[in-house]
Structure formats: C-alpha cells, structure tokens
Amino acid sequence: MAFDINRILIADDDERPRQLLAHYLKSWGFTVTECRDGLQAAALLEADNAPSLAVIDWMMPGLEGVEVCRRIRGRDGHHPYTYIILVTGNSDAAAGLDAGADDFINKPYNVDELKARLAVGQRVVKLERRLAEHIALLRDALDQVAQLPETGSAVCVCPDCRRVRDDQASWQEIEPFLKEHTGMHSVSETCPDCQEKHRQVAREANPLRQTPLSVGVEGS
C-alpha cells in the first residue's frame, strides 16, 4: 500500500471513547483503523502496510500500550516509521516515552490539543520517510562507488587504437568502458596543443598558405 500520512490506528478496549475519537479523526480527514486490545495493535503496527500514526491506550488486554510501544521500537530499522501517541491517563508518562512512545495525551481528550499533536506527528513521519529515501539513495550511490576500479589501479589502453582492456582480458571501445565502470561518457574536444600541431602540419603541407598574396596595379 502506498504511503498515506492520514492513516491512523486507534487502540482502546473502551468502546465509547474509541468510537468518539474515531468520529473526530474522520472529520479531520483521517482514515481510521480501530482495535480493542494490545495484541491486535501490535500486529497491525508490525504489518508492512502499518498506519503512519497511532493513538494507543495504556491499559488494554493482551498487551498494555507501553508494551506495544516497546515491541514496535524493538524491531530493526527497516520498517516504515509510525508516530505513536500513548494515552496515559494517570500512568507514568515518562515510562511510556522511555518505551518508545513519541508523545502522550491524557484522558479525557482535549480535542484541540490532540489535533495539534497529530499535526506534529504527521510532520515527523514525513521527515522520517524523506530521510529513509535519502538513505536508500546514498546506499545505492555507495554500491555504485564500490564497483568502480580501485584508486591507483592501472587501466590498459592501446596506444594505437585507444581501446581498453577489461578485467576479462577483452578489448573494448573506451566509451562503453567509461559508462560501465564510472557512469561517465566521453566528449571529443581537441586541446590547444594538438590544435597548434594540426595547424603546423597544415602549414608544412601547403607552404603557399604561409606566403601573403600580393595584389598590385601596374603603372601605365
């Protein structure tokens, strides 16, 4: 499933506040998934198409919210990031943050505060996804660099035809060799020294070009 910043999970075993929260979220443009215990929440957040945001109650059957956070953050770093807001009630907010929650909010919800915190979460998730894309591009670039010939290694070039010998001892034109090993291509341009040499050869081949042509009028 494509990345969607508006997909959110609500995990709360108390049906009435869960449905009320879902109503508000849908009115704000979110696509809401609901569950009623910690095991379901963990399974949804561990899926490849996990929501970008989650509001998780602390006290739930199966797994408490703080344990869900700890389980999700304990995975390797190859999964899309989910911003988790833990509903703490009277519980220890610091313990929730230590377990991996990004933010916390108390019951009963302050609607305006929750909306603002979700907006912060969306910004964080966008930055996380952008960072992951840049890291992937960097890894690709490093892989390409690793395939280049080592610095200081010799490249065998024929002095007559200017073809290059590759690692398999076969000879090829320099243009495809450059593309294969560096991603570069060659551009033909005559250097100033060679230009002067060409002009000297032309002068030697045609001495008349060196003699100024005199045009005169004979007197009567």
Image: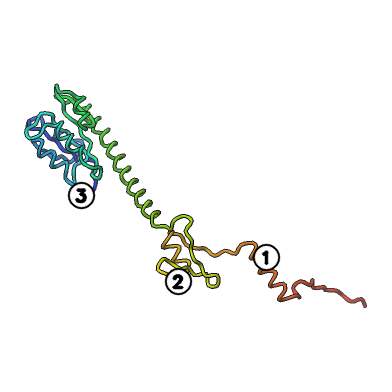
Kind of residue indicated by mark 1? Glu
Residue at 48% from the left image edge and 63% from the top image edge: 155
Q: Nearer the viewer, residue 2 or 20?
A: 2
Q: Quadrant of residue 117?
A: top left
Where is residue 147 drawn, in percent x and y? Answer: 39, 57
Residue 121 in the figure: left or right of residue 174: left
Q: Nearer the viewer, residue 217 or 105?
A: 105
Disc 2 is placed on an element classified as strand
Looking at the rendering, in which quadrant would you find the C terminus? Answer: bottom right
| Residue at which label 2 appears | 171
Label 1, label 2: how far apart the Cα atoms are? 32 Å
Disc 1 is placed on an element classified as helix
Q: Nearer the viewer, residue 3 or 103?
A: 103
Disc 3 is placed on an element classified as loop
Kind of residue indicated by mark 3? Met
| Residue at which label 3 appears | 1
Q: Earlier in the sequence, mark 1 or mark 2?
A: 2
Counting other residues with Cα less than 10 Å from the Cα at mark 1, is it few (<14), some (14-19), or many (20 or more)?
A: few
Q: Above or below — where is 169 with respect to 183?
A: below
Q: Nearer the viewer, residue 133 or 218?
A: 133
Where is residue 87 drawn, in percent x and y? Answer: 16, 28
Kind of residue indicated by mark 2? Trp
| Residue at which label 1 appears | 196
Residue at 57% from the left image edge and 63% from the top image edge: 189
| Mark 2–mark 3 CB contact (< 8 Å) | no
Residue at 20% from the left image edge and 31% from the top image edge: 99
Where is residue 43 drawn, in percent x and y? Answer: 13, 42
Q: Quadrant of residue 79?
A: top left
